[in-house]
Amino acid sequence: MYNLLHEPWIPVQRKNKDIPEYISPHRITEAPAAGPVISVAAPRPDFNGALLQFMIGLVQTAYPPESKAVWQEKFIHPPSCEELKAAFLRYADAFYLDGNGPRFMQDHDLVKKEGRQNTVDRLFMEMPGEQTREKNTDHFVKRGTVGTLCPSCCAMALFTLQTNAPAGGRGHRTSLRGGGPLTTFVMGRTLWETIWLNVLPPHVMNRFGNAKKTGMADIFPWMGHIRTSTNNETTTPRQASPLQMFWGMPRRIQLTFEDHTDAAECDLCGCRVHTTVSRYTDKSYGTHYSSGWHHTLSPGTTDPKTGSVRPRLGQPGGFSYRDVPGFIGNCTEREITRRPAVAVQVFREEREPYLADIPGFPFRLLVFGYDMDKMKVRGWQEGSFPLICVGNGIRSAYDAEVSGLVKTADLIAFNVRVSVKKALVMPGATAAGNFSAIDAEFWQDTGPEFYRVVKDVQETLKKGQSLRDLNLQWLAFLTREGMLLFDRYVQPGMIPAGNPGRIARAQKNFLVFSSPYNKQIAKTLGLQNPPAQGQIISGTDLTGTRPDLCEAFISWWSELDTGAGHDRAALRHCRTPREVARTPAFHRLKMRSEMSGLLTPDTITRLAIIAGVLSHVTENKPDKYEPNVNRSFAARLARPPPKRIREKKPCVSGPQFRELLALEDPDSLYTAMIRLVRLLGGSVDIAGLSRGIFQWNKCIKKEWAYAYYAQVPGNETKGV
Ligand SMILES: [Zn+2]
């Protein structure tokens, strides 16, 4: 007979080996010179999730740590295979997959009673019903390709179904945690560590069921009279051992084994075996688990009305760092509190402080589950995140800060989506297209930086320093990433398609919303006093030019008329940047700018253009409508020139502005900029003008385009 405690049916990966190996459960701690077992390695990702839960359930049932000290000891020195084998053996009767007695996760009554015959492919979670076949929405298994399974694959499929069972029509009961529950694990460096990190002391387990129920049938429902639910009878945690959470059996199933003289091939893993399964019998109205079951590996949400905790189910869109606060700590949003799995909670409260001294930290958090649409599987979602170890002293401050960072990202993500919609869609019209892709990209793009920032948060908190600068840098980073996404989706380029005015206004709204002056942002990030307008915070400047360079330009310009007074006249006579570069005044500017460390051979020409153009400026006048130096000059071009203020026409028309942005050649740029300065009567914002010329790249041109189109009257944007 095929016993799951004796047979080598668990596919695992050893360190430094490419090919998976099949072992029996007690051999997980076997560490020959070949290397320790590091993970499970099933042919499907959802089977891996199930196998991990099987192993954790088995160790939790047969070999739980009696005390904290025992847990710590066994973490460092795993038990021998013999020790595990002896512990598991006591439960061997419950793990026969075939035979005439009770069978693992099967209903032996079905042998006698009439049940429905099924092909084995229907054991798979997503195996399509008629409707999904028609719509062709099956994900994992190609239709009609699985007809025969080996006992190993069959055991995995059976355990996966009983553990995740979705609603499936009348009398098809869902798993103890509902259809397609979310599961989180703390991951260690080896498979033993991963299992042991999620196994809890009995006194913790006993909170989740009736600890007095210790019989085999109380733990493994198939070992006694099956609790069916024809009249909707429920099974509550009071009526079973807490360990039943790992061995729940909502579906009544009996596998049909076939023996072959010639080995047959398994359609899933490809192995050749003499015993296979291609059919099974089932019957509805299996064990109906009441609400109130709390699985130690599932995060939950607290119902605001009843206060009861429900297990969380899978979700579309996958996981990102946005979900992490609710997976590792309590996290309240709109009255609903997300709670971590008990195993994660115990890890953070008891085990993490102890493990922090072990080299090889940090551990990771693995999250997975199906993305379900009622009874239909849309996909499998999996993600893993670093578990950053923080001391108990700064834990609550750290959690609050991380939650603030995530909430800020949430606000900005929302803002990107809204802004893109505003830019692309006429007001009042319904939005076409899928805007949720923007969200997914935003969370993915900002993830790596998030983990860099939280490390800094930890260091900063340890030193007892203020988090203000870190918060402002995070906000600036999110804004920059949000802008990149906005550009990618709206694709304004330098010559916007669609309605450039609407795009530019949407972009401006995005920046206003994302600024530290937005009350909601300031509150979320704990910025009691936002920085003064125009104050530059290190690491937050979006274009990366240091302010000292602009200061160098302004002070150089203000000295043009001092001394002999020939400098300005000499510069004004220059017809090209090359001629400018030969003047003594230019060399003074160059020496002054070199101190900034920003000059390269490429930028010398730009510097010459600036020197020549600034010689035509008679008044340095920061723009009163646009304080941002990256935009001030272009914004000014959208308004009438001083001498024709009544005509209400912009200095530069739409077509002229596009020509300006298309200029690349230094000589043309030089001439064009001088013409503009003259048009403005010599009165410009020197910082804005010189910064624009100094950078003159895609980035600054985009800023100019946004600034111009946000201010220019509507008729100038027509026909583009
Ligand atoms: Zn197989």
Image: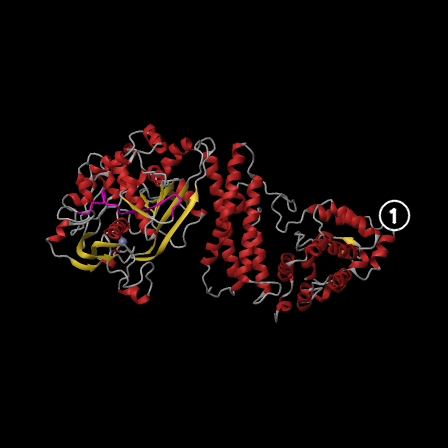
- On the image, the x and y values in percent for residue 131 come to 28, 65
How dense is the environment of label 1, judged by Cα within 10 Å: few (below 14), some, or many (20 and up)? few
Asked if one can make out residue 281 in the rendered structure from this viewpoint, the answer is: no
* Quadrant occupied by the C terminus: bottom right
Name above or below for residue 259 compared with residue 466: below
Name above or below for residue 348 compared with residue 674: above
Q: Secondary structure at mark 1?
A: loop
Specify whether 29 is left or right of 613.
left
- On the image, the x and y values in percent for residue 231 come to 16, 51
Q: Residue furthest top?
A: 69
For the record, the magenta segment spans: 1-17
Asked if one can make out residue 512 in the rendered structure from this viewpoint, the answer is: yes
Front in this rendered view, residue 650 or 27: 27
Q: Residue furthest right?
A: 564
Specify whether 216 is left or right of 542.
left
Total labels drawn: 1
Q: Is mark 1 within 8 Å of ligand 1?
A: no
Specify whether 250 is left or right of 405.
left
Front in this rendered view, residue 639 or 82: 82
Specify whether 518 is left or right of 571.
left
Kindly identify the amino acid type of the residue bearing the numbered disc 1: Gly
- On the image, the x and y values in percent for residue 668 come to 74, 64
Most common secondary structure along the magenta stretch: loop
Q: Is residue 7 magenta?
A: yes
Find disc 1 in the rendering and name its residue: 563
